Amino acid sequence: MKTAGIIAEYNPFHKGHEYQIRYAKEKLKADYVIVAMSGDYVQRGTPALISKHARAEMALRCGADLVLEMPVSVSTASAEAFAMGGVSLLDSLGVVDMLCFGSESGEISALKELAEILVAEPEEYKKLLKSFLSEGLTFPAARSQALTEYFKNPRNFSGDDFDGVLTPLLNEVTQILSTPNNILGIEYCKALLLLNSRIRPVTLRREGMGYHETTVPEGDSASPSPDLQSSTDFFASATAIRSLIQNPGSNHSEASSDINNPGRNSDNKIANILSSQIPEPAFPVFQKAVNSGEFLTENSLDSILSYCLMKENAKSLSSYMDVSDDLARRIINQQNLLLSFSQSVSVLKTRELTQTRIQRALLHIILNIHTVPTQIPFARVLGFCRESSELLSQIKQHSRIPLITKLADAQNLLDSEGNQILSETVFSSNLYEKLLCLKTGRKFCHESQKQLIII
């Protein structure tokens, strides 16, 4: 049995994600694909567009065999902690042979070389990093500069290494470290090294529109061919799809009709654009969620953020994950100017604090998250395919952590730390559900009452 693992957010699931699953099965010859997926909140520090159960169902309908939920403290953490959590979860199952992830580079050797240096942290690299941080650069920018300077110095390498392998890599370092999927890929490789994992990293070149591209391409040219060799130039980014849902018509002036209105004709322009980007088996799940208004944005948190900040002071704020002492003081000093979630991020942003870092910090204040575990002590199942019974059987036999299919069973299966991590996640998902109910007027369904997705 050959099993591939994927760490993902699927915010939302689109044809690029379907392509990755197909690649794992057709090119890497994986018998099964396990997805470690973010829950109802994601790494950029916002609610997921649609619920974790809907996203899990979309993935299962498009070839995934098992979808596991990453705890909220992991799924909303920095790239390093996010990667370590996801890798530790897959590694603990005892059945995953390879970790498949997309990257702009598409070259696993370069990502592994950089990961090895970041794990070893040579003294010269640490000095360079400290120097660039002292100049006021953000950590990602300082790390990129430090690695670039480190590679420029032949004294840091043996002659053969520098001439044969590292000289070509020097020319790529800045480019590699300037793109989000490459950065995450390096963190995955770092985590595998630190865990001494037997899982082999495999990367495929991320195709289609850029990660931050906000325009959704039109037409049906994003459909992969049966032989998986079609052009993928028109894969939209998840950012672009979210943008179209939140601002219908902002990118397509003619597409002013609203997919959120279920009374509109199903062949309206936005629906056609989205159906070209969401895989056909998954589209009904996505369309149902959006048509019924079952989706959230960061500004769904506006009122609750104001309430949470009102009851804090600088000392208490600094106890939350991603909230530094400086940011805590800045929040208190600027509190009268903080209105909506997005506006607050703009007010608080500085040269040293990125937008994503501030979003994560504000979300952690709302969700009462103070720390992130280095390893996930359980595997919570969101859904699986009926035909994957052999996979589940192998996991139960080899896993070093308990498999949670019912919340009612968790208390007896987990220690106090595990129960605390799960409790945080259940609370945050209940808040997500409550916000959906307030928006749509439907009845609240507690996390413990939600059913596994079985395809």
Image (spheres, helix red, strand yellow):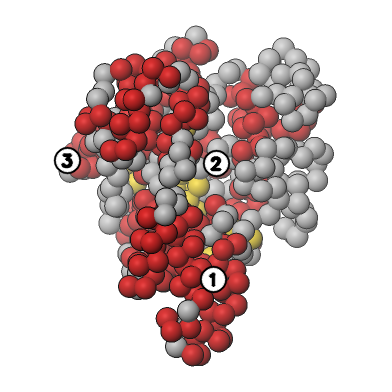
Task: Give the number of the disc on residue 220.
Answer: none
From this view, report whether residue 177 is shown above or below residue 432: below
Residue shown at the point (62%, 47%) measured from the top left? 211
Q: Which residue is mark 3?
A: 416
Front residue of this view, candidates 444 and 313: 313
What's the CA distance linking mark 1 and mark 2? Answer: 26 Å
Q: Give the SS element for disc 3.
A: helix
- Sequence-first tag of 1 and 2: 2
Front residue of this view, candidates 17 and 182: 182
Quarter of image, res 205: bottom right
Task: Give the number of the disc on residue 10.
Answer: 2
From this view, report whether residue 87 is shown above or below residue 150: above
Q: Residue 144: where, in percent of width, then height?
A: 49, 61
Q: Residue 85: where, in percent of width, then height?
A: 36, 51
* Mark 1 or 2, closer to the camera: 1
Q: Which residue is mark 1?
A: 110
From this view, report whether residue 30 is shown above or below residue 212: below
Is 444 displayed left or right of 246 in the figure? left
Tell me the kind of residue under disc 1.
Ala
